[in-house]
Image (cartoon, coloured by chain):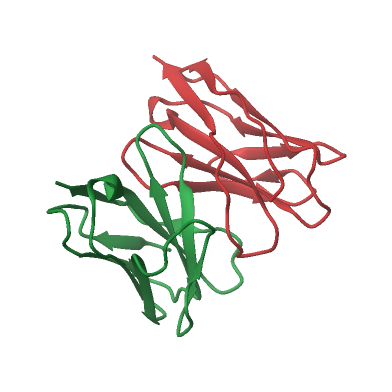
Chain colours: A green, B red
Amino acid sequence: GAVVSQHPSWVICKSGTSVKIECRSLDFQATTMFWYRQFPKQSLMLMATSNEGSKATYEQGVEKDKFLINHASLTLSTLTVTSAHPEDSSFYICSATAGTADEQYFGPGTRLTVT
Amino acid sequence: DAKTTQPNSMESNEEEPVHLPCNHSTISGTDYIHWYRQLPSQGPEYVIHGLTSNVNNRMASLAIAEDRKSSTLILHRATLRDAAVYYCILQETSGSRLTFGEGTQLTVNP
């Protein structure tokens, strides 16, 4: 149990376009979802925390108008990278927690390449 | 967020035990100690967590020092599939955000 999926697994887009990444909890209801970004050979960096039906809480330095997060249901959160630029190319990973569980369940990640 | 310190890398031989250390001298009384691991090009995977007492599960054991300023993740018999980056993370409250450090790259030799 506790499976989190992401779609797409990889995407290539042109500079200036927007890209939407979906994160789904397949077999549990996710009260909270988290979005991370990971550059090559670096650790994960938390971008934002979102609770179902609420506005996301962004980490310092993350532009909320550029990285739009929607958490419309207990099983789906989306991250939209607006007006993408090559420096936004990265590995985007979501995670989710279920109720009072302590551990986070991570998705497989989405590789974004902006050309 | 309280900080953790881990060695950059460690090596082990297949089928031998591995002890991955983590120092967290500024841990607060309510911080949980979490371990996750990440294989290349994959999302992290939960390994184990604890608060004060040692913990065991099917993947690993977590030994927590009495003063809680350090902990050790124990893989009882390393396999090649255990080669990954292991992250030791302090979580302030149950279900709250995780702040990843650099982790320990574990290499398992056949």
Q: Residue at x 49, y 25 (%)?
A: B106
* Residue B104, image quadrant: top right
- Whether residue A97 can be seen here: no
Q: Which residue is at the far right?
A: B67
Is residue B26 shown above or below B102? below
Q: Position of residue B31 (x, y in %)?
A: 74, 54
Q: Residue at x 56, y 74 (%)?
A: A99
Q: Please state if A5 lies on the left or on the right of A49 as rendered.
A: left
Is residue B76 shown above or below A75? above
* Residue A107, image quadrant: bottom left
Q: Position of residue A67 (x, y in %)?
A: 35, 65
Q: Position of residue A89 (x, y in %)?
A: 26, 46
Q: Position of residue A27 (x, y in %)?
A: 38, 71
Is residue A57 shown above or below A14? below
Q: Residue at x 42, y 73 (%)?
A: A28
Q: Please state if A32 lies on the left or on the right of B71 as rendered.
A: left
Q: Residue at x 75, y 52 (%)?
A: B51
- Whether residue A108 can be seen here: yes
Q: Please state if B85 lies on the left or on the right of B68 as rendered.
A: left
